Image (cartoon, rainbow, N blue to C red):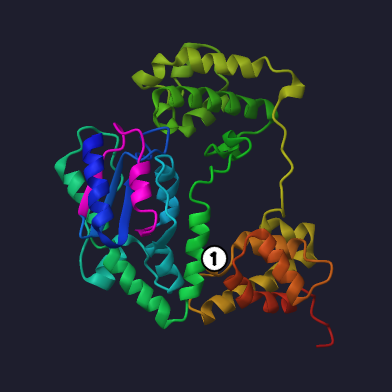
Amino acid sequence: METSAELADVVSRMSAGTGPVAVDAERASGYRYTQRAYLVQLRRAGAGTVLIDPLPLDDLRTLDAALAESEWVLHAASQDLPCLAELGFRPRRLFDTELAARLAGFERVGLAALTEQLLGYSLEKHHSAADWSTRPLPDSWLTYAALDVELLTDLRDLLAAELERQGKTAWAAEEFAALVASADRPPRVRPDPWRRTSGIHRVRGARAQSRVRALWYARDGVAARRDSAPGRVLPDSAIIAAAEADPKDERTLLGIPGFGGRSVRRLARIWLDALDQARALPDDALPVNQPVEGPPPPHRWAERDPIAAARLARCRAVVVGTAEQHNLPPENLISPDFIRRLAWSPPDEVTSQTVADTLRGFGARNWQVGLIAEQLATALPAPDPAD
């Protein structure tokens, strides 16, 4: 479906359907610069399955309005909600089958694994990493995409029953509400994204790091103009190798691994200009290590603050024990980052209430706080040596 007239028909069909609507989206991660949706799949009882090509359509707001009162069923919702929000398509209620499976204690939470375990069907996953920006999309890809929503509602019902059996329905409701609240929140912009270049730990010195930075931003500009994944323009390994070698002419540059391909060679002047700019920087314009917000990496705690390191160990033991007791992954019981921040800088007065308030301030849900705050308040103070 790719025309306004066809969209109007889909809106009518989905409005006449009943029950939850299964929703999925396919992106072209690893192929394109953006994370936009290149295919949207829907299925609802009484309406059937619909595949929407969003490229020729302005937006999906009419469909959004038609499904405003419906519960959406998605798998790993946080991956798809941002690209759907770009189309004006946002849930008011949802059920995330992956998150539900985590809360229910399933070891394997992928869609194919859950479908096979709970419903007895095997899903083909051959096209999961395909370039969904391809047009026209092959029929086999469309069949694969349709199957991703075919059984989602059945899976939702079984997982909802399991959560109810375990007494975790209210926990899941809080998690799903948080996903809805963040559905159209813009992604957090990382400071100095070039510092995430794979292998940058090998680059020593601010001058060499300035070459990584210059090449990273040059590549990003090309990738954005081409709408191509940055790694397809120039691999990280090539950026690191060039930053270490600091080539000053095209022949030397093209001799560095990663710069030999025809498309990369055509951009040689861009890479050399970036390196020239880095070379011309005054010392006060070179990269400096930014102060890290929050606690340091845990492996450095013992050296920097042994008392805090001991607090963290006690808090982690509480998290692991409580998670095992409730058949939960520890990271779903509470964010590891929240525990690190709490252990590094606990409240001045440690009580169940102050710990609970601190965790809520970090973003913990009420159900998480209720399960763990009191035990953490007991674990934070150092044990009495006399005990």
Q: Is residue 318 visible?
A: no
211 or 150: nearer the viewer:
150
Magenta residues (range) = 48-75
Quarter of the image where the C terminus is located: bottom right
Residue at the extreme bottom of the image, as rendered:
387
Quarter of the image where the N terminus is located: top left
- Taking the magenta stretch, the answer to whether it contains residue 74 is yes
**Relative image position of residue 46 (x, y in whole percent):** 20, 60
> Which residue occupies 62% across, 64% down?
364
SS type, badge 1:
helix
163 or 56: nearer the viewer:
56
- Taking the magenta stretch, the answer to whether it contains residue 123 is no
**Relative image position of residue 125 (x, y in whole percent):** 25, 53
User: In the rendered view, does 321 fall on the left or right side of 310?
Assistant: left
The residue at which mark 1 appears reads as 331
* Residue 348 sits above or below residue 208 on the image: below
> Which residue occupies 60% across, 28% down?
213
User: In the rendered view, does 274 fall on the left or right side of 300?
Assistant: left
**Relative image position of residue 247 (x, y in whole percent):** 54, 17
| Amino acid on which disc 1 is placed | Glu
> Which residue occupies 84% across, 87% down?
386
Q: Is residue 55 visible?
A: yes
Are there few (<14), some (14-19), or many (20+) residues within 10 Å of tag 1?
A: few
User: In the rendered view, does 123 fall on the left or right side of 100?
Assistant: left
* Residue 62 sits above or below residue 315 on the image: above
